[in-house]
Amino acid sequence: MKALLIIDDDTTSQIASFYLKPMGMDIIRYRDPLKALDNLDEIQPEAIIMSACDFPRHWKPIVVNIRSLYSKNECVIVLLKGKYFPFEEAAKAAHLGVNGVIREDLGDDQERTRFQQLFKRYIQVDEARSTDRRPVARWDKLDFVFTHPVSQTLLTGRVESISSSGLSMSPDHAGLCADLEPGLVIEDASMRIGDQVVSLNCKLQRSGAILAFSFENLSAETADTLRRYLAATPERQMKTLKAENS
């Protein structure tokens, strides 16, 4: 599935992409709304996310053009608003066929939930990927280490994604993990979550170039630490992106 971003601001684009990719969306971005409109037939997106802040004068005629080609069920249009977006503008957006209007920083749990629910309502997203699983990015401090149950070799790697129920990792030395079979229970693995290091048990769900683990019987304290860390992802993300783009 394709999501077309019509967004000029780099930070806004990166934040939107961050929440679209786990739903199985392929991201295509245009800074120029007129060029995006010219290529609409070629792209054939299932979703369009457009910034009303970046294009306050363009979004209305663009929505009219898009709706002349695609219905609300064929192409979801989400308008990202800034701090000032009067009721009259929201009413016009609804009248023109915008599926939803969301705050562009997505810094609030409720706004993020609305953002994702809009897509689930109108299109068939990849439910297997639309849980709280999140890709690990440069603003995260996550590490995972475990001991090979036979060779007793310490195995390390890069954490690729994480959720409240498990993680995936790319091992530093794939050959050392080649004999690990799905279903294997790893005891006393270590994971760094921010500034804390916790011990946990996990089960190997998928082997290969990327290892996938599910967490087994997390303690209440560890589960709460992980939950709070995941919930704080937007704050870490926006702090990093704003610092990089300032």
Image (cartoon, rainbow, N blue to C red):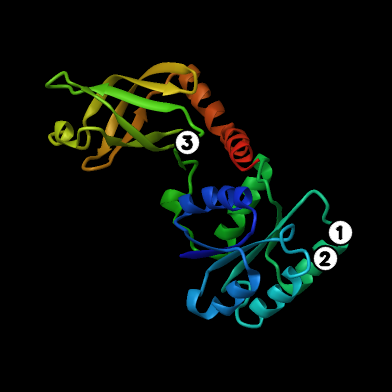
Amino acid at circle 2? Ala
Amino acid at circle 1? Phe
Position above or below: 98 against 17: below
Q: Secondary structure at mark 1?
A: helix
For the residues carrying marks 3 and 1, which lies nearer the camera in this image?
3
Amino acid at circle 3? Arg
Q: Indicate left or right for 40 with 129 as reference.
A: right
Q: How many neighbours does mark 1 have within 10 angstroms: few (below 14), some (14-19), or many (20 or more)?
A: few
Q: Which mark is residue 91?
A: 2
Q: Which mark is residue 138?
A: 3
Q: Indicate left or right for 84 with 161 as reference.
A: right
Tag 1 residue: 87
Distance from Cα at disc 1 to Cα at disc 2: 6 Å
Q: Residue at x 82, y 65 (%)?
A: 91
Q: Give the camera-side residue of 13 and 232.
A: 13
Q: Which mark is residue 173?
A: none
